[in-house]
Amino acid sequence: NAGVMQNPRHLVRRRGQEARLRCSPMKGHSHVYWYRQLPEEGLKFMVYLQKENIIDESGMPKERFSAEFPKEGPSILRIQQVVRGDSAAYFCASSGTGDHQETQYFGPGTRLLVL
Amino acid sequence: QKEVEQDPGPLSVPEGAIVSLNCTYSNSAFQYFMWYRQYSRKGPELLMYTYSSGNKEDGRFTAQVDKSSKYISLFIRDSQPSDSATYLCAMSARGGRRALTFGSGTRLQVQP
């Protein structure tokens, strides 16, 4: 039973380039969450998606960041025109339905470094 | 003031000690409480999940929630060097919004 998968695990971009981070939820899970972890800080919520719908994007920066979870394929977090302050670990989590729908399981993360 | 406060540590204990980790929170809407363990440069791993007030035990781990005091705890009995990690508390409110709000994490070092 595969867990949450994220790729790439490490990503290096120069300022101004685009970064695309991918997340495949656990089998049977249809809820995906993205979090960002800056050095020496806790995880900060960014966005919550279900298939083809953004449910809550209250933690997403208004500029340059977007997320999608298409009917087929992984969820994608896209960062356009990256800046050095975007350097962080980005974690995806997924959850199912029913009694433990609040329980989120995390992937290994993508570490983004902006040069 | 942060919604969730957690002492960053580091907390250093000898092997076999009982470890107590704590978080306080300010948002009375929080109903679901979790503890995650995160090893260096890895993703958070769910340890304990509790709903509302009370205790929950799983092996060497016990989670306590006191909603009246807005205080949650994680106890680790017979701590092992392999327990050395950062422990994150997390919580969420009931309803459509299911974003987790995390504490900043407590770094634990168990000395052999």
Image (cartoon, helix red, strand yellow):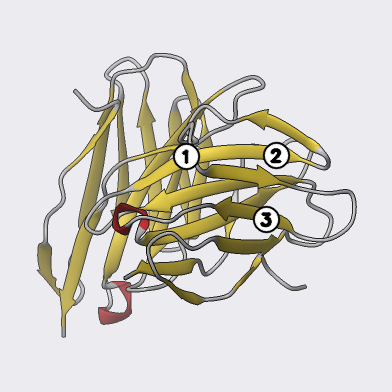
Which sits earlier in the primary sequence, circle 3 or circle 2? 2
Q: Quadrant of residue A101?
A: top right
Q: Which residue is mark 1?
A: A45
Q: Which residue is mark 3?
A: A76
Q: Residues within 10 Å of mark 2 (few under 14, many from 20)?
A: many
Q: Amino acid at mark 1?
A: Phe
State how many labels appear.
Answer: 3
Q: Position of residue B30 (x, y in %)?
A: 46, 22
Q: Residues within 10 Å of mark 3 (few under 14, many from 20)?
A: many
In the depicted view, which residue is nearer to us: B94 or A111? A111
Q: Quadrant of residue B78?
A: bottom left
Residue at (31, 72) in percent of width and height: B83
Q: Chain of mark 3?
A: A
Task: Kindly indicate whether the residue at mark 1 contacts the one at mark 2 (C-beta within 8 angstroms).
Answer: no
Residues at marks 2 and 1 on the same chain: yes
Q: Position of residue A61 (x, y in %)?
A: 45, 35
On the rendered image, what quadrant is the C terminus of chain B found in? Answer: bottom left
